[in-house]
Amino acid sequence: MSQQAAAPSGMASAGAHAPVKDSLSRPITAGGFVDGAPVAFVDITKQAGLEKFHHRSGAPDKRTILEAPGSGVALIDYDNDGWLDLFVVQGHVMDNIELTEPSLRYLEPPLLLKNSENKFRNVSSQSGPIFQIPMAARGAAFGDLDNDGFIDVAINCNDGHAILLRNQGGSGHHWLLVQLVGSSSNRDGIGAKLRLVTDDGRERYAFASTAGSYLSASDKRVHFGLGGSKKIQLLEITWPSGRVQRLDAIPADQILQIHEPSR
Ligand SMILES: [Ca+2]
Ligand SMILES: [Ca+2]
């Protein structure tokens, strides 16, 4: 995916501000979406480096993260550098799977892949002891539980207690949390599309949604990692009602509550 490519729905991305065409040379609207064009997928697995990651330690060489069950998956910017990283919790559904499929495991450790300009690398071993502990994880919810701007994680496990991971932050990167309050739209602004432009001209996109992995509901606030940017040039919200709201000159590192304007 190039810097200029349209971000898939529901994802934020650290793309450049211009030109406004996607990878298939289709024009992108101000809201970041292609007007009326067919929606197409391009296989960028190898370009992103994802084909080389095993779903678990000890798996056969041909088994990759995309071929085996990982029921809790999310693209989150855990280090606020502006690039969405991949967080996976996993474990096979059968507790005796190893009797019939020796290459599979009931218990698996979580996995964290850091995205650097659309290239992923496994940073699990340097991201905390939890990434070494096998578990029958089923789902994960993501949100900033302590309001420090870094996304924390709650994991639910089969036949086990919940696990709460506090993100210790410390990257020095900036962030923004957007709490939407709908009026004509639904109260939480679920389904709103957000486009953010930082002071260095980079664009990011997101949807307001709590949906995600199995048995989990995430923070309804919309999180943006901003890298080194301390100011947001533009934040554009397309509410489910269709109303478009624009705010400018927003300082980073805050929880911003935005009310849908009345008609
Ligand atoms: Ca990141
Ligand atoms: Ca936090």
Image (tube, grey):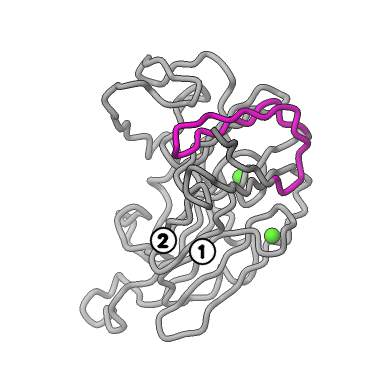
Residue at the (75%, 46%) spot, across then down:
254
**Alpha carbons under labels 1 and 2: distance apart:** 7 Å
Mark sitting on residue 256 = none
Whether residues under marks 1 and 2 lie with C-beta atoms below 8 angstroms apart, the answer is yes
Q: Regarding ligand 2, which quadrant of the image does it lie in?
A: bottom right
- Tell whether 35 sits left or right of 134: left
Dominant SS in magenta: strand
Give the farthest residue toward the front: 263
Residue carrying label 1: 141
Identify the image quadrant of residue 174.
top right
Amino acid type indicated by mark 1: Ala
Residue at the (62%, 52%) spot, across then down:
78
Of the image marks 1 and 2, the number of the one nearer the N terminus = 1
- Tell whether 130 sits left or right of 36: right
Front-most of residues 98 and 107: 107
Mark sitting on residue 213 = 2
**Image spot of residue 219 (x, y percent):** 56, 58
Vertical order, 101 against 250 (above or below)? below
- Tell me if mark 2 has few (under 14), some (14-19) or many (20+) residues whose alpha carbon lies within 10 angstroms of its own: many
**Image spot of residue 124 (x, y percent):** 57, 60
Residue 121: within the magenta? Answer: no
Quadrant in which the C terminus appears: top right
- Magenta-tinted stretch: 231-256
